[in-house]
Image (cartoon, helix red, strand yellow):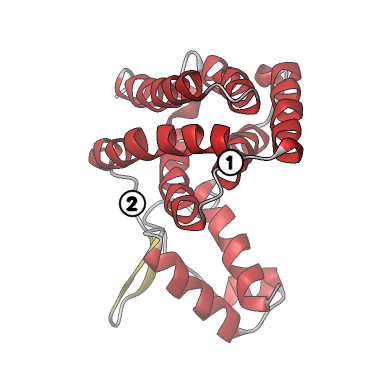
Amino acid sequence: MSLADRAYLAIQDRLIMLDIPPMAPIDDVALIESLGVGRTPVREALKRLEVDRLVVSYPRRGTFATGVDITDLAYISEIRDQLEPLAARRATRVAGPAVRAELADLAEATEALDVRTLERHELMRWDLRVHRAIYRAAGNPHLEDTLVRYNNLATRIFCLFLDRMAHFDRHVGEHAGLLRAIAGGEADEAERLAREHVEGFEKAIRAII
């Protein structure tokens, strides 16, 4: 992995988890020092993150974390509502035995989680891990890249409102059924659960704003 890739993933994580708050200025010098890389990898990473809509640059003002605008929720959900079920259905068709076994193991591990005891970062990273495993299992790198980008944006919204969500444990628990449906090759069920998961997330956020 290149230094730019390392910087990209590390800064992306800080932005998704809101360790760099929405609208906050990006301190290049602090990032260089904390990541132990040079200025060039950090700048390359920030250019990629701008494409991902996680940062925005203004001439003569600098680079800032993008805001978390709740109006974006509808746009993000509209895309995910179409593509998450597609990825789930596709994964039931193309995933091989090793991938299916991995998803089944992940389902068991998800059910074993004591969600209420997890720190916010742990919970959000588990959520990301499950979604990204499904995207990879779908076997379409272009679909995977698109879904990762929009799931990252959705996760920022999730992080922002997590403390006010009454049933976030239910949301995380839904992953187990979805993973099992994919591992079992149940295309219709996987598609249905993926769509309900996305729609349920949007409804849960809207219920508290």
Nearer-the-camera pick, 207 or 137: 137
Q: Nearer the viewer, mark 1 or mark 2?
A: 1
Look at the numbered disc 1 and give the secondary structure of its residue: helix
For the point 44% across and 25% down, the residue is 191
Say few, some or many: other residues with alpha carbon within 10 Å of mark 1 (under 14 / 14 to 19 / 20 or more).
some
The quadrant of the picture occupied by the C terminus is: top left
Nearer-the-camera pick, 163 or 138: 138
For the point 62% across and 71% down, the residue is 5
> Image quarter for residue 125?
top right
Please state which amino acid type lies under the numbered disc 1: Val
| Horizontal side of residue 60 vs 17, given as left or right | left
Please state which amino acid type lies under the numbered disc 2: Gly
Image coordinates of residue 156 in percent, x first then y, are 45, 43
Image mark for residue 142: none
Image coordinates of residue 84 in percent, x first then y, are 43, 36
| Horizontal side of residue 156 vs 206, given as left or right | right
The quadrant of the picture occupied by the N terminus is: bottom right
Image coordinates of residue 89 in percent, x first then y, are 48, 32
Residue wearing tag 2: 67
Nearer-the-camera pick, 46 or 52: 52
Task: Tell which circle, 1 or 2, labels the residue nearer the N-terminal end.
Answer: 2
Residue wearing tag 1: 94
